[in-house]
Amino acid sequence: MSQIHIRREHRLGLAKARQVALQWAEHVEEKFEMDCTVLEGDTSDTVTFTRSGVKGTMVVTGDHFEVTAKLGLLFGAFAGQIESEVSKQLDAALAKAQKKA
């Protein structure tokens, strides 16, 4: 089983980071047929995402995002490509949010 780990620092604060995470969750639900659940907390949120062969979380705080995912056998062969695509999407979402800040 392959794993993906991505961490991105930011200066958005929790409220804006929460918006980025919600948009990201909506995007992966639509594009990759993921089932996402968002659990909001006082100092951080956790987005869980699953589909056949993929299970992971995105922890959202006022100063960073941390994505971890476990890939099943089928997706494990594409771990590098999947990690690259998730990184690209997260970086784009952060850049867009930071321009608005």
Image (cartoon, helix red, strand yellow):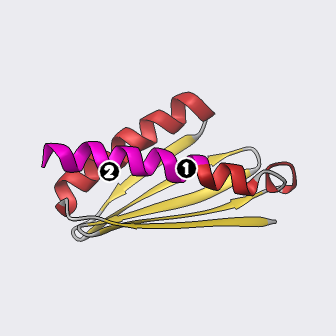
Q: Position of residue 40 (x, y in %)?
A: 30, 58
Residue at image position (18%, 55%) is 15
Residue 87 higher or lower than 34, as above or below: below
Q: Quadrant of the N terminus?
A: bottom right
Write down the residue under mark 2. Answer: 94
The residue located at (63%, 55%) in the rendering is: 83
Q: Is residue 6 left or right of residue 83?
A: left
In which image quadrant can residue 41 be found? bottom left
- Asked if residue 84 is among those painted magenta in the image, a careful observer would answer no
Q: Earlier in the sequence, mark 1 or mark 2?
A: 1
Q: Magenta segment, which residues?
A: 85-101
Query: Residue 10, located in which quarter of the rendered image?
Result: bottom left
Q: What residue is shown at x 35% (from left), y 44% (from top)?
A: 93
Dot 2: what SS?
A: helix
Amino acid type of the residue that numbered disc 2 sits on in the rendered structure: Leu
Q: In this image, 2 relative to 15: left or right?
A: right
Question: What count of labels does the image hold?
Answer: 2
What amino acid type is highlighted by mark number 1?
Val
Query: Which numbered dot is residue 86?
Result: 1
Residue at position x 27%, y 42% in the image: 96
